[in-house]
Image: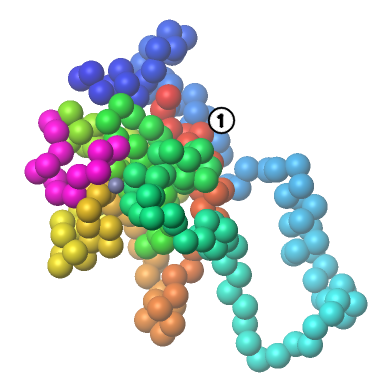
Amino acid sequence: MTDESHRRGDDPALDEPAERAAVHRDSLPAFEPAPEPEAPLVAEHAWGAPTQMSSELPGVPDEFQRLWTPYRMVYIQQGQMPQEHACPFCRAPELGDDEGLIVARGETCFVLLNLYPYNTGHMMVCPYRHVGMYDQATTEEVAEMAVLTQTAMRVLSQLTRCQGFNIGMNQGRIAGAGIADHLHQHIVPRWSLDSNFFPIIAKTKALPILLEDMRRDIQAAWPA
Ligand SMILES: [Zn+2]
């Protein structure tokens, strides 16, 4: 299939997609945060001796627990989108990979992380073209969406050891599509214990990995 060559690129050093994927996979420990230069220092201070230092810091303890959600800063910093970029799926490819949450760019379609993930690693595959319904996509777009979806499954399996997936599209606002005018296929990894009491009591999802960390890991593991 021609789409296979699109994903693989022109690097002659590695001929087989599986060989390329293996190189990336072996360079990335599964589901362990990559060590950053400043990360160990922060981690030691955050987890090493909190009680000893807390009395010296400003603030009065209260009965509330804190749910730290720094991943939402992506949305806060972006702010209101200009009218000419009302469609986030049209805007995302114009941005850098990190700002657009993009993990892979194909010929007719691209893959990005969901800013509002149902689960850690929740990705979406979109055509570049602003079309809403699946039957409006071209044969080439449909084919590449399928190939990118398969690759997303393999990468998530390697990285997160997930046990299953929910994959699908909501077609039309009445069917639950949040952005109905631009076709997008959801890929949501599932684990046996990923449903907890949080969504039930507080409409809150606990997501153990920050979006940018997940995006970087997925992009690194994605076959070139
Ligand atoms: Zn669009």
Residue 135 on the magenta segment: yes
| Quarter-of-image position of residue 110 | top left
* Residue placed most toward the observer, 13 or 163: 13
Q: Amino acid at mark 1?
A: Ser
Q: Position of residue 105 (x, y in %)?
A: 38, 32
Residue found at the very far left of the displayed protein = 135
Q: Which residues are magenta?
A: 127-139
Residue located at (25% from left, 23% from top) = 3
Secondary structure mostly seen in the magenta stretch: loop
Residue 64 on the magenta segment: no
Is 203 left, or right, of 135 in this rendering?
right
Residue located at (52% from left, 56% from top) = 78
* Residue placed most toward the observer, 80 or 151: 80
* Residue placed most toward the observer, 78 or 161: 78
Residue located at (76% from left, 56% from top) = 42
Beta carbon of the mark 1 residue lies under 8 A of ligand 1:
no
Q: Say which residue label 1 marks.
A: 27
48, above or below 21, in the image: below
Q: Position of residue 71 (x, y in %)?
A: 55, 60
Label 1 sits on a secondary structure element that is loop
44, above or below 67, in the image: above
Residue found at the very far top of the displayed protein = 12
Q: Position of residue 204 (x, y in %)?
A: 44, 75
Instruction: Specify the quadrant that holds the C terminus.
Output: top left
